[in-house]
Image (spheres, grey):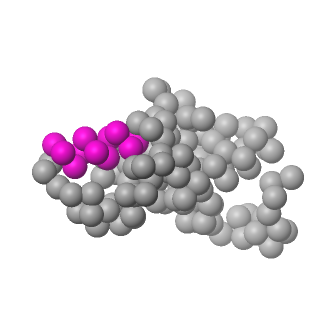
Amino acid sequence: MMGISGSHIWDIETHEDEIGSNYSVADVQRFCGVLGIQPRYLFGFEMVSPPLSSNEIAVLVRQHCRLRGITIAQFEEAAGWSVAKSLDDPARFRHDYSIDGIMNICRELEVDWHRFMESQ
């Protein structure tokens, strides 16, 4: 039902960091839909608000760079992830980055990554 093989499910069940390092926000939200739970239950956090959309992350990255006088490339170096393509197509934030990637990007932006997990 989740669209992944049995071996991937075994990896998720046996490796604590598997979901964070190998699956995107969209993947995790799909998994949670199959399981009938919210992402906050999977990761063990309380409801956070307001949710943070992909478009808002793109705006925050641009604002962050402008306010600090840094380039997108410098932001990418600090976050450890390339984000330039996602600024033009914010939906990519949901599909192209692992949970770890979103955590690193949000850390640089000084926003709670859980807010992104709660948005649709």
Residue 110 seen by the camera: no
Q: Residue at x 41, y 36 (%)?
A: 56
Q: Which residues are magenta?
A: 57-67
* Total tally of numbered discs in the picture: 0
Location of residue 12 (image quadrant): bottom right
Judge from the rendering whether residue 93 lies leftward or rightward of residue 17; answer left or right: left
Tell me residue 73's x, y (percent): 27, 63
Tell me residue 27's x, y (percent): 67, 53
Residue 13 seen by the camera: yes
Residue furthest toward the front? 88
Residue furthest toward the left? 69
Decide which of 63, 101 is in the foreground and name it: 63
* Residue 65 colored in magenta in the image: yes
Judge from the rendering whether residue 56 lies leftward or rightward of residue 73; answer left or right: right
Residue furthest toward the bottom? 7
Q: Residue at x 43, y 57 (%)?
A: 85
